[in-house]
Image: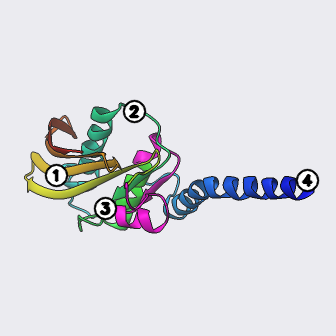
Amino acid sequence: MKRIVILTTLVALVLATFLNYIDIVTFMISSIQHKEEVTVFYQEGIESKDRIADISIAALNSIIASRLGEQQYRFVSLDVKKIDNFSDGEVQYLLTSFKKYSDKVICASLKDLMKIGLCTPLKKDLHGGILLAIDDIVEMTKESVVLKISAHESGMGAAGYICKLKYKDDKWEVVELEPTFMA
């Protein structure tokens, strides 16, 4: 009887540790990558309409608003590797901007999330998290931008969009968000 109690307690402890493992990993990553208040200092001569980070924030916020509204996620991951235009300061600025959706905001691709255990390999489920990505800059002028963007929550909860933005009243606004694929 004593062995059963000890074994049950041990199993419960291991299970509790495993279930908290994902939260511990995301916290560790987000605390390494995230700094509280981040201001991006752009090189002299770069106008606000040329700031790719502000364009990305407007576009990616539109995905969240179109999907489920401004809900809280267990974590938010930004895949910024596909676009080489982000400086380290801009990446920190992006991370700070998405703190309103989760306390845990990291930079990681789907492959990275699988490696660290935040995404199941077969079902590609993020267990309450969301992965946002700027996949391509299709067209960029001084007054408008067209981006390919995507969101991923699970294997059957992913979507791609063409996002058209215009620069007006000193900020970037999404004028059209057209779905390209839904899973």
Is 65 a magenta residue? no
Q: Magenta residues?
A: 97-123
Task: Work out how far the residue at label 1 is from the one at label 2, CA to CA, in angstroms.
Answer: 21 Å
Q: Amino acid at mark 2?
A: Glu
What's the CA distance linking mark 3 and mark 4?
55 Å
Question: Which residue is labeled 1 in the image?
Answer: 148
**Label 4 element class:** loop
Disc with the residue nearer the chain's start (2 vs 4): 4
User: Would you name the residue on which mark 4 appears?
Assistant: 1
Describe residue 79's horizontal placement relative to residue 38 as left or right: left
Given residues 69 and 7, the one toward you in this image is 7
Q: Earlier in the sequence, mark 1 or mark 4?
A: 4
Real-space CA distance between mark 2 and mark 3, rounded to the nearest whole angstrom:
21 Å
Amino acid marked by disc 1: Lys
Task: Tell me the SS state at disc 1.
Answer: strand
* Residue that badge 2 annotates: 70
Amino acid type for the residue under numbered disc 4: Met
Question: Which quarter of the picture shows residue 51?
Answer: bottom left
In percent of width and height, residue 108 lies at 39, 62
Tell me how far mark 2 sits from mark 4, CA to CA: 50 Å
Residue at the image position 16 percent from the left and 58 percent from the top? 136
Instruction: Determine which of the numbered discs, if any, sits on residue 137 in the image.
Output: none
